[in-house]
Image (spheres, grey):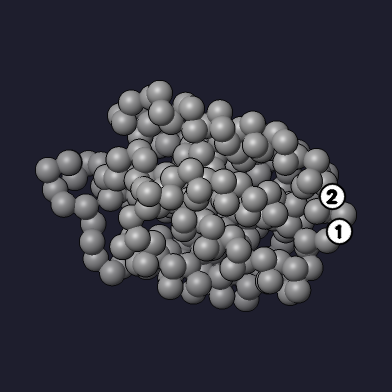
Amino acid sequence: MGLFLGLTKAGFNGLTAVIIPIIALDNFFGAQASTGLLLPLLCFADLIAVVYYRNHAEWKYIGKLIPWAVAGFAVAVFVVELIPSQAFRYLMGGCLLIGLLVMFWSDRRGEEKAPPSGLWFSALFGIAGGFASMVGNVAGPIMSVFLLSMRLPKNSFVGTAAWFFLIVNYAKLPIQIFVWQNITVSTLLTSLTLVPVVIIGIFLGFYLVKKISESLFRKLIMILALLSTVLLFINIQ
């Protein structure tokens, strides 16, 4: 888990969504409890990613997404107590499925066409990203779809995602601690044991992002997003 989380924060958005369907099962941590376990690790890894990619963020995209992500937070806080654990996972998968459909639609339009720029596009991904981040820390693939649709080069892609998630994840901390109360001393101690592995994963990810081509990077991110969606909808017992 820690290795995948580190790789995610280094640019391979979606790897955490591969393990989240497993740790979100009731016989492991449960869907809501798993968000409290992962969030402190995500916040730690966000700091490293922001320092490393500090010169590559595209702030115009971050500015478009953050207000809508806050709206997604509000939706999540409202519905989280109304749905069972199993439905929680389906909601995560639904967010990813929406993102994938728009990604494939965007690709079919061709590179000669301008990236989507309407308010609806930023609103869709901002709300879905905020919601998915709050309920299950699976906004990575959703943001991947948005940023790939903007056709950002890999360093700008990773730098923009790093700053977006730094803002989003630290904004979530008060809600997770004081409202949902799923970040406790016990979960923090569990998270702390994974910190060394997270560090290894993130620096391995930095190395891999440097080595692979732009086209291969894009394909890998799309595959991860698709795999994340499939795993969230599979009913693992």
- Circle 2 residues within 10 Å: few <14, some 14–19, many ≥20: few
Residue designated by label 1: 185
Q: Residue at x 35, y 34 (%)?
A: 218
Q: What count of labels does the image hold?
A: 2
- Report whether 67 appears left or right of 230: left
Pinpoint residue 151: horizontal percent, then vertical percent.
27, 45
Amino acid on which the number 1 mark rests in the picture: Val
Mark 1 element type: helix
Callout 2–callout 1 Cβ contact below 8 Å? yes
Pinpoint residue 161: horizontal percent, then vertical percent.
44, 51
Pinpoint residue 66: horizontal percent, then vertical percent.
44, 67
- Confirm whether residue 156 shows in the render: yes
The front one of 209 and 80 is 209
Classify 144 as above or below 75.
above
Quarter of the figure with the N terminus: top right
For residue 221, which quarter of the picture?
top left
Per the model, the C-alpha gap separating discs 2 and 1 is 6 Å
Amino acid on which the number 2 mark rests in the picture: Leu
Residue designated by label 2: 189
- Report whether 25 appears left or right of 231: right
Mark 2 element type: helix
- Report whether 64 appears left or right of 36: left
